[in-house]
C-alpha cells in the first residue's frame, strides 16, 4: 500500500490524474485489485463507482490477475480475411486457453482485439509489446516456444 | 258508398287475418325457454372469460388496460408482487351488473387473456352474485368467435 | 441577448442558452430523453435533434448546442421525424417490450415517444439483454434491461446528491449502469434516480406492481418529516397512498426528495395504527367512544385543577402538529386549564431559534433556502446535512458545483460533505463555541471584519472583543484539537467571500447547546456583515416539519403566540417530567420515553394521577396513559406547516379518516368547547384562521412567505453581539467521549412505523475509530455495552475512519432511546464501551 500512496502523492496536485495513477498502479501490482481501487478512491477523494467505471471502460486495465505474457491476436477485417480464425484456434489449442482467459500458472493471458493497426502484416498477433506479422500456425509454435 | 266501405273493410280484415293464419304454418321464432336453449351467434358478446396459455399459466398479467377502457368501471383489479418477484394478479373482479358487454376490454387486452363467451344466463338472486371473481372467470364457458 | 428564429417564430434568449431552451420558449416541442432541467446537459440520446439552416451537419443536437444570433431552427421536418423514428427503433432493439407489467408504463418517456412517432415495428433485429434484475437492494429495484443509458441517474446522484453511488460501467454494447464491483446499492436511498429515470429501469420497490400510474389520483401536500417543507405528491388509489412522487414545478424542493419523503409513507397504512379511543381500566385498555373518552379527559383535568391547582397539570405538544393545531392546543392549555406548563421538543430542540431571536430579533433562518446555492462560502457548523436535511445538502452541492462556492465543514467527525471542502475543522465534541470564538479572534486579529457594519448595525462589540481575547489559535488547538492553519484558512475563506452563510442544525438527538451555537454563529455573521444580504446569513435548521410553527404558535412555556411575553413562565419539558411535580399531563404527538434524554421519564409518567396521550400509535409513552386519543396522519388532515424559511404551506386532505380517528384539530376544538374556553372563529377554524385579518396569527401565517417582516429592513435595527463560552470536558485515557448525532431516517414518531425505512436504517449502532476499536478489542458488528454516568445501553459496534480517535458517536435510532446516556444537559459525556 505504501507503493500506492507514493503513486498517488506524485499526482496529488495534477487534475484528472486518475488514468496515469491507474496505469502506474497496474504496473506496480500486475493488475488492479479492489483494495487498490479503494485506496485510489480515498487518496483522490473520488467515488469508487466512478473509478470502477473508468477501469471497466478501458481494455488496458484488468481487475483480475493477468499472465506474464499477454498474447493479443487480431481479428480485424484484414486479418479475418487472411485467416485470423485459424490463427486464433491454433493459439487456443497450443496454450490451452480460451479467449479472455489466463493460465493458472499466470504465464499467459490470451485476448483477441479488433485491430492492431498493422493490417499490412495481417494476420497479426502481439506478445506483450512485440509484433509478429504474416502469421501461420507453424510460426506460432516457434514464437510461443520462445516464451 | 256505405256498402263499398263495409266490403272493403271486411276484405282488409280477411287480409290481415290471412297473415296471422299464414304464421300458424311458419316455424316459430319464440324459444320455449328454459326447456329450449338458444344457440348464440358466433359473434355474441356474453360473460367475459379469462384464459390460460398452453402451459396452463394465467394469461392475464394485470396491466389494468381493460379496467381503464371499461366505460362503466365494471372491472377491478388488484395486483402485487408474487413468486419470483413476478407480477401477480391478486384479484380480478367484473361486476356483471354494470357491464355493458361492449367488448372494449377485450379489444384493450394486450395478452389475449380476456374474451367474451356465449354465456347469457347471468341472472342472480343478489347483487353480490353479479360480481365475478378471478376463479369464476377462469371457469367461464368456451369463447365465442367474437375476437379481436 | 440572442435573437433567433425557431419554426418561423422569433425568440430572444439569454446568452449561453441552448437551442432546446429557445425552442421551449418558442413553444416548439422538442422530444428529449436524457435532458433534465436540474442537471447539466449531457447529449446522450440524440432524440432532440433539430435542423439548423446553414450548418454543415444535417442535424444538430439541441440540448447541447448553444443558440447563436440569427440562427434559423426547424424542429419538425419530415427528415427529422424519420431520424427520430430511427433512433427510437435503435433504442427498441434491446429494450424489452414488457409495458403491461412495467411500473413506469403511462409515464414512460420512451413509451410516449414511440406512440407519438408511430413506431409500430422495428427494421433492426438484435438480441434483448438478459442482465439480472437487482432484487437485493432495498427500496430501489434496478432492471437494467430496460435501461436506455441516458445517464440521468448517474448525473443526479453525482451533481445534486454528491453520492455517486452508480456510474457507467463497461463499454460499447455491454455498457450498463452499475455500482462498483456490481454490489447491491448501499447509498442514502433518496430515490432521486427513480424520479429522473425516463423508463422503468429504476423503480420503487414499495410501489412495485401495486397500481398503474394512470389509476392514481395525485394530491400535492407537504412532507411530514424534516423542516425543509418539501411538496410530496401522494398517489392515491382506493383510499391508500400507493406511491409518493414529486414534480419539478411544484413546491420549494423543485422535485427533489429524500428517502424519508419518498419512501416513508408506510406508517399511514400501518395496521398497528390506533382506530378507537382507549381508556385504561384495571390496567387494561378498553375501546370506548369519543364522547366518553373526551368527557373523561375533561372531568379528570377539572378534578385535578380544583384539587391541586392548575399548575399541577402540564402539556407536551409536538412540532409535527399544524400551526392551527398548535395554536388551539396552547389556547386549550392556557385558557382552558389555566397553566403555562406547555412545551415541546424536550424544551431544547428549538433553542437555536430563540438564540437568533435574542441576537437578531428574528427567530428563524435569516434567508430562504434557495439563496444557499448562490452563496460564495458556506460554513457547515455541526451540520451533517446528508443525515438530517438531505435537501439542503442539494443546495450546498449546487453552490459548490455550479457557483464555485467554498465549503468549510466544522463538525466533530468527518461527514460525507467533507469530500470537497476548502477547510475541514474536526473539533473535539462539545467545543463548538471555543472554535467559533477562535475564528472570531482570528478575524479580528487579521482585520477581516466589516467595521462599517459593526459600527452602524450592531451593539455589544466591545463585550465580544474582551471575551474572545484569550481564544488564540494555540489556545483553540489545545481545547478543540484543531490545526491552527486549518482554522486560519477557514477564517479567510469565510471572511473574504463577498457573501457567506452559516448552516447549523438543531434538534433532539444533537448536542443541547443549540442556543449558544446559534448565538456564536450569529456573532460570526454580524462580525463579517453577512446579515441582511442576499445569499448570506445564518441558517438554523430545526428538526421537524413544523418546528418553526410550534415556536411561532407559542407551544413553549415562556412565550405566547407571536412571541408575546407571558406573565409567569410555566415549567419546561424537563421540569414537568421530574417525578412528583405534576399530577396530570396531556402529551400530544410526543414520545418522551423514547426520545428524551432523561432516564426516569417512565417513572415520572407512571407517578402521574392522570395521563392523556394523543398519538397515532401505541408508543411506549402511550402504554403508560390513562386515556389514548387516536389521531389522523398528515395525509388525513388539513392545515399549515411553517418550514425553516418561515414559508407557510398548506396541507391537503388526501385520505378519509383511518377508522374512527379524528384530526388533532377536531379533538382540540371539542375539548375547548367542553372546557368552556372560547374559540373566536367560525365553525371551520381551518380556513378562517388563515383568512381572518384581525386574527393575531395572521401576521406570520399570512401569505407564502414572511419576507417583508425581516427586522433588518428597518433602519433602526441593530444586531446584538452576545458572547458565549463553554466549559471544557476532559476524558481519561480509558474513556471515550460519547457524542450523539441526529441520523437520517430517524425521528421515531413516524419512521419507526415504516418497516422499509427501518430495514435500511439497520440496527442501532455506535461508531468508533478503528484504532480505538483495536484497543478495546472490537470488531465491526460486535454487540457492545456503552455506559455513561447516566445510563448504559446495548448497541452494535460500527468501525469507521470518519470518527476521530477518542470519540464514540451514538446515532439516534427509532427503536432505542440512546439519548438517556447524555442526561439533562445533552452535552458530550465521558463514557465507556465494553464488549458484551
Image (cartoon, rainbow, N blue to C red):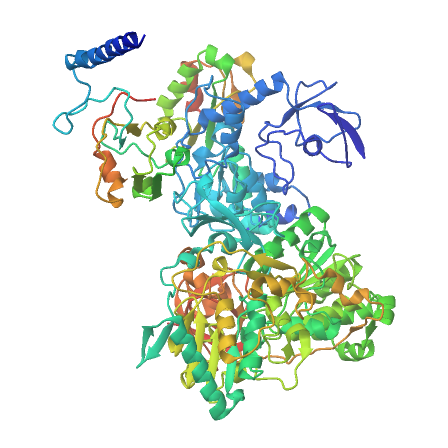
Where the N terminus of chain C falls, by quadrant? top right
Q: Nearer the viewer, residue A56 or C741?
A: C741
Left or right of A2? Residue C694 is right
- Viewer-nearest residue: C708 or C507: C708
Q: Residue at the spot x=66%, y=85% of the render?
A: C567
Pinpoint residue C325: horizontal percent, then vertical percent: 55, 68
Q: Is C204 displayed left or right of C53 in the figure?
A: left
Position of residue A47 relative to residue C380, above or below, is: above
Q: Nearer the viewer, residue C229 or C349?
A: C229
Outermost residue toward the front in this view: B2
The quadrant in which the C terminus of chain C is found is bottom left
Counting from the top left corner in percent of width and height, residue B25 is at: 14, 12
Residue C619 image offset from top left, x and y in percent: 41, 70
Outermost residue toward the bottom in this view: C307
Asked if residue C810 shows in the view, the reply is: no
Residue A113 appears at what percent x and percent y?
A: 49, 23
Residue with the most extreme left position: B35
Where is C159 relative to A127, above or below?
below
In the picture provided, is C639 more to the left or to the right than C814?
right
Q: Residue placed at 78% from the left, 36% from the top?
A: C15
User: Looking at this view, is C86 or C732 the one in front?
Assistant: C86
Place residue C620 in its image quadrant: bottom left
Amino acid at each position: 500500500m505504501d507503493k500506492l500512496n507514493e503513486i498517488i502523492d506524485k499526482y496529488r496536485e495534477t487534475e484528472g490524474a486518475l488514468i496515469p495513477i491507474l496505469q502506474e498502479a497496474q504496473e506496480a501490482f500486475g493488475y488492479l485489485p479492489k483494495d487498490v481501487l479503494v485506496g485510489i478512491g480515498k487518496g483522490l477523494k473520488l467515488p469508487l463507482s466512478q473509478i470502477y467505471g473508468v477501469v471497466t471502460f478501458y481494455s488496458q486495465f484488468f481487475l483480475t490477475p493477468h499472465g506474464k505474457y499477454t498474447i493479443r491476436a487480431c481479428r480485424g477485417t484484414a486479418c479475418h480475411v487472411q485467416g485470423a480464425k485459424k490463427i486464433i484456434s491454433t493459439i487456443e489449442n497450443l496454450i490451452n486457453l480460451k479467449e479472455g482467459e489466463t493460465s493458472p500458472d499466470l504465464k499467459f493471458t490470451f485476448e483477441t482485439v479488433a485491430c492492431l493497426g498493422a493490417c499490412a502484416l495481417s494476420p497479426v498477433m502481439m506478445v506483450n509489446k512485440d509484433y509478429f506479422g504474416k502469421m501461420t500456425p507453424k510460426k506460432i509454435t516457434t514464437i510461443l516456444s520462445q516464451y | 258508398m256505405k256498402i263499398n266501405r263495409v266490403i272493403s273493410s271486411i276484405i282488409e280484415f280477411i287480409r290481415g287475418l290471412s297473415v296471422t293464419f299464414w304464421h300458424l304454418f311458419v316455424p316459430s321464432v319464440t324459444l320455449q325457454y328454459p326447456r329450449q336453449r338458444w344457440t348464440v351467434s358466433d359473434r355474441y358478446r356474453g360473460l367475459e372469460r379469462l384464459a390460460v396459455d398452453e402451459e396452463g399459466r394465467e394469461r392475464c398479467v394485470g396491466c389494468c388496460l381493460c379496467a381503464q377502457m371499461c366505460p362503466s368501471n365494471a372491472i377491478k383489479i388488484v395486483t402485487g408482487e408474487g413468486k419470483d418477484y413476478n407480477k401477480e394478479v391478486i384479484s380480478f373482479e367484473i361486476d356483471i351488473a354494470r357491464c355493458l358487454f361492449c367488448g372494449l376490454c377485450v379489444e384493450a387486452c394486450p395478452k389475449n387473456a380476456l374474451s367474451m363467451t356465449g354465456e347469457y344466463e347471468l341472472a342472480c338472486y343478489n347483487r353480490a352474485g353479479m360480481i365475478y371473481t378471478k376463479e369464476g372467470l377462469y371457469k367461464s364457458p368456451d369463447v365465442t368467435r367474437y375476437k379481436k | 441577448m440572442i435573437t433567433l428564429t425557431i419554426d418561423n417564430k422569433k425568440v430572444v434568449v439569454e446568452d449561453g442558452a441552448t437551442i432546446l431552451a429557445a425552442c421551449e420558449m418558442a413553444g416548439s416541442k422538442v422530444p428529449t430523453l436524457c435532458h433534465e432541467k436540474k442537471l447539466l446537459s449531457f447529449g446522450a440520446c440524440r432524440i432532440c435533434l433539430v435542423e439548423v439552416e446553414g450548418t454543415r451537419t444535417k442535424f444538430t443536437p439541441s440540448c447541447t448546442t448553444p443558440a447563436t444570433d440569427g440562427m434559423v431552427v426547424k424542429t419538425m421536418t419530415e427528415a427529422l421525424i424519420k431520424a427520430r423514428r430511427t433512433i427510437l427503433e435503435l433504442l427498441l432493439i434491446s429494450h424489452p417490450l414488457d409495458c403491461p407489467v412495467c411500473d413506469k408504463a403511462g409515464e414512460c418517456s420512451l413509451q410516449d415517444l414511440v406512440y407519438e412517432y408511430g413506431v409500430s415495428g422495428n427494421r433492426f433485429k438484435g438480441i434483448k439483454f438478459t442482465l439480472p434484475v437487482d432484487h437485493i437492494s432495498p427500496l430501489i429495484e434496478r432492471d437494467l434491461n430496460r435501461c436506455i443509458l441516458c445517464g440521468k441517474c448517474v448525473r443526479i446522484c453525482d451533481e445534486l446528491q454528491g453520492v455517486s453511488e452508480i456510474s457507467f460501467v463497461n463499454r460499447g454494447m455491454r455498457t450498463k449502469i452499475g455500482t462498483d464491483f456490481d454490489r447491491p446499492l448501499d447509498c442514502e436511498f433518496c430515490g432521486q434516480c427513480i424520479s429522473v429515470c425516463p423508463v422503468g429501469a429504476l423503480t420503487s420497490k414499495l410501489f412495485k406492481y401495486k397500481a398503474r400510474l394512470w389509476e392514481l389520483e395525485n394530491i400535492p401536500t407537504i412532507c411530514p418529516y424534516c423542516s425543509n417543507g418539501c411538496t410530496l405528491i401522494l398517489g392515491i388509489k382506493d383510499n391508500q397512498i400507493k406511491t409518493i412522487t414529486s414534480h419539478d414545478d411544484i413546491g420549494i424542493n423543485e422535485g427533489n426528495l429524500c428517502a424519508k419523503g419518498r419512501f416513508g409513507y408506510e406508517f399511514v397504512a400501518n395496521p398497528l395504527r390506533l382506530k378507537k379511543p382507549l381508556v385504561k381500566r384495571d390496567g387494561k385498555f378498553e375501546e370506548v367512544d369519543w364522547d366518553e373518552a373526551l368527557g373523561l379527559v375533561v372531568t379528570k383535568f377539572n378534578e385535578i385543577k380544583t384539587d391541586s391547582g392548575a399548575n399541577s397539570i402540564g402539556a407536551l405538544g409536538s412540532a409535527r402538529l399544524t400551526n392551527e393545531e398548535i395554536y388551539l392546543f396552547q389556547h386549550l392549555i392556557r385558557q382552558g386549564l389555566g397553566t403555562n406548563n406547555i412545551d415541546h421538543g424536550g424544551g431544547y430542540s428549538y433553542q437555536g431559534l430563540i438564540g437568533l431571536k435574542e441576537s437578531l430579533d428574528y427567530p428563524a433562518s435569516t434567508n430562504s433556502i434557495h439563496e444557499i446555492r448562490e452563496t460564495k462560502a458556506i460554513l457547515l457548523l455541526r451540520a451533517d446535512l446528508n443525515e438530517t436535511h438531505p435537501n439542503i445538502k442539494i443546495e450546498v452541492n449546487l453552490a459548490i458545483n455550479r457557483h464555485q462556492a467554498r465549503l468549510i465543514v466544522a463538525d466533530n467527525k468527518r461527514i460525507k460533505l467533507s469530500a470537497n471542502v476548502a477547510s475541514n475543522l474536526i473539533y473535539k465534541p462539545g467545543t463548538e463555541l471555543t472554535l467559533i470564538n477562535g475564528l472570531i479572534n482570528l478575524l479580528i486579529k487579521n482585520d477581516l471584519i466589516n467595521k462599517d457594519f459593526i459600527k452602524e448595525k450592531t451593539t455589544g462589540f466591545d463585550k465580544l472583543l474582551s471575551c474572545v481575547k484569550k481564544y488564540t489559535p494555540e489556545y483553540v488547538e489545545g481545547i478543540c484539537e484543531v490545526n491552527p492553519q486549518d482554522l486560519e484558512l477557514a477564517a479567510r475563506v469565510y471572511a473574504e467571500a463577498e457573501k457567506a452563510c452559516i448552516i447549523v442544525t438543531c434538534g433532539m438527538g444533537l448536542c443541547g447547546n443549540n442556543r449558544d451555537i446559534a448565538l456564536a454563529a450569529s456573532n460570526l455573521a454580524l462580525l463579517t456583515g453577512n446579515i441582511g444580504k442576499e445569499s448570506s446569513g445564518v441558517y438554523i435548521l430545526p428538526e421537524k416539519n413544523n418546528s418553526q410553527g410550534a415556536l411561532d404558535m407559542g407551544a413553549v412555556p415562556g412565550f405566547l403566540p407571536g412571541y408575546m411575553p407571558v406573565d409567569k413562565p410555566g415549567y419546561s419539558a424537563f421540569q414537568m417530567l421530574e417525578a412528583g411535580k405534576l399530577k396530570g399531563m396531556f402529551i400530544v404527538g410526543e414520545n418522551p420515553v423514547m426520545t428524551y434524554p432523561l432516564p426516569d421519564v417512565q417513572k415520572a409518567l407512571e407517578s402521574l394521577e392522570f395521563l392523556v396521550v394523543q398519538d397515532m400509535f401505541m408508543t411506549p409513552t402511550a402504554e403508560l396513559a390513562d386515556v389514548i386519543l387516536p389521531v389522523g396522519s398528515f395525509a388525513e388532515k388539513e392545515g399549515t406547516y411553517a418550514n425553516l424559511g418561515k414559508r407557510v404551506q398548506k396541507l391537503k386532505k388526501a385520505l378519509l379518516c383511518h377508522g374512527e380517528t379524528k384530526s388533532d384539530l377536531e379533538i382540540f376544538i371539542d375539548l375547548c368547547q367542553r372546557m368552556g374556553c372560547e374559540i373566536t372563529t367560525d365553525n371551520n377554524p381551518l380556513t378562517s384562521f388563515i383568512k381572518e385579518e384581525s386574527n393575531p396569527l395572521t401576521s406570520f401565517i399570512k401569505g407564502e412567505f414572511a419576507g417583508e417582516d425581516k427586522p433588518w429592513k428597518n433602519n433602526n435595527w441593530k444586531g446584538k453581539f452576545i458572547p458565549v463560552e463553554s466549559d471544557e470536558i476532559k476524558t481519561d485515557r480509558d474513556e471515550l467521549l460519547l457524542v450523539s448525532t441526529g441520523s437520517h431516517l430517524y425521528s421515531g414518531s413516524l419512521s419507526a412505523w415504516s418497516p422499509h425505512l427501518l430495514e435500511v436504517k439497520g440496527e442501532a449502532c455506535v461508531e468508533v475509530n478503528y484504532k480505538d476499536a483495536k484497543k478495546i478489542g472490537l470488531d465491526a458488528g460486535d454487540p457492545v455495552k456503552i455506559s455513561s454516568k447516566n445510563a448504559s445501553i446495548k448497541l452494535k459496534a460500527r468501525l469507521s475512519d470518519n470518527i476521530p480517535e477518542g470519540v464514540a458517536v451514538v446515532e439516534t435510532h427509532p427503536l432505542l432511546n440512546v439519548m438517556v446516556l447524555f442526561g439533562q444537559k445533552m452535552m458530550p459525556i465521558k463514557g465507556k464501551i465494553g464488549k458484551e
